[in-house]
Image (tube, grey):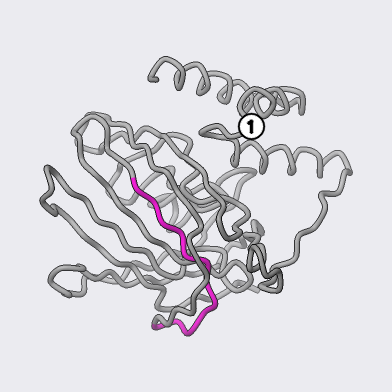
Amino acid sequence: MARQFSEEAAVWEKAQQASQVAAVEDYLKRYPSGHFSELAQVRLDRMLAKQGEKKVSLVNTAANPFTKGTGVIDLDYRVGDRYVYRSIDLLTKVEGKSSINTVTAVTEDKVIYNNGALVTDLLGNLIKRPDGASFGPAQFFISEYRLGKKWTTRYAINFARGGQDTIEIDFKVAGRETVTVPAGTFDCFRIEGSGWVLGIGQQTDWKFWLAPDKVNRFIAMEAWWRMRGRIVRSERQELESYARAG
């Protein structure tokens, strides 16, 4: 399994570095449901757009009775966009310090917050965390959500204190529901994920709620980490406020 993933990761790395559409198309042909296929599709769409080819636009809607609509993440970040989240321990209900993330730069494939303290890709996947940890290519967040959609991500985490591990999570869009957080009430897709931090054998379970037609980052997120059946950490993050630049 590790060898197969390494082979796929090498193909994806080549596609990431290539300036030609063919390299990305080659990855997608070989791994249509791969660990980086959602990322590859976004890269392909953006490369084709530069060549003047228009992607078929999907509309954010809840009208389809089978999928309850498709949610499409807006990749148009702007310098000055501001997101404030509060953090709550799910066991103790103690509220932690709010995090204020302001976009200070946007590149071809990265969103940089707070002058580099936090870095994500255009979908919101972590690249660098404020504590100094860094992450390999991940498709924790994807570009399009519809009821029943499933995908898998596997990525490396490099800890600030040294050391590395690998995280693998299976995700599914499990439902649509209305969620109220300090920033307001949103009609959301609910995504559920379950996986492992492979090296240390830690189980990790996730839920997050997205309203792609309103905000391009998550509305709320819950995470549980367990070791040998014992909860070692739990957290809920909620959007307190969101301000769009311009």
Q: Amino acid at mark 1?
A: Pro
* Residue density around tag 1, few if under 14, some if 14–19, many if 20 or more, within 10 Å: some
Residue in the foreground of this view, choosing between 141 and 240: 141
- Residue topped by disc 1: 32
> In the image, residue 221 lies at what x, y percent?
37, 64
49 is higher (above) or lower (below) than 63: above
> In the image, residue 99 lies at what x, y percent?
33, 67
Residue in the foreground of this view, choosing between 81 and 43: 43
235 is higher (above) or lower (below) than 246: above
104 is higher (above) or lower (below) than 3: below
**Numbered range of the magenta stretch:** 182-194
- Which residue is depicted at the point 27% across and 29% down? 164
> In the image, residue 115 lies at what x, y percent?
44, 54
Q: In the picture, residue 215 is in which quadrant?
A: bottom right
> In the image, residue 31 lies at what x, y percent?
61, 27
Identify the secondary structure beneath mark 1: loop
> For this view, does 240 lie left or right of residue 82?
left
Magenta residues: mostly which secondary structure?
Answer: strand
- Which residue is depicted at the point 20% across and 40% down? 202
- Which residue is depicted at the point 67% across and 40% down? 41
> For this view, does 17 lie left or right of residue 132?
right
Residue in the foreground of this view, choosing between 57 and 110: 57
> For this view, does 38 lie left or right of residue 26?
left
Residue 123 drawn in magenta: no
Q: Quadrant of the image for the N terminus? A: top left
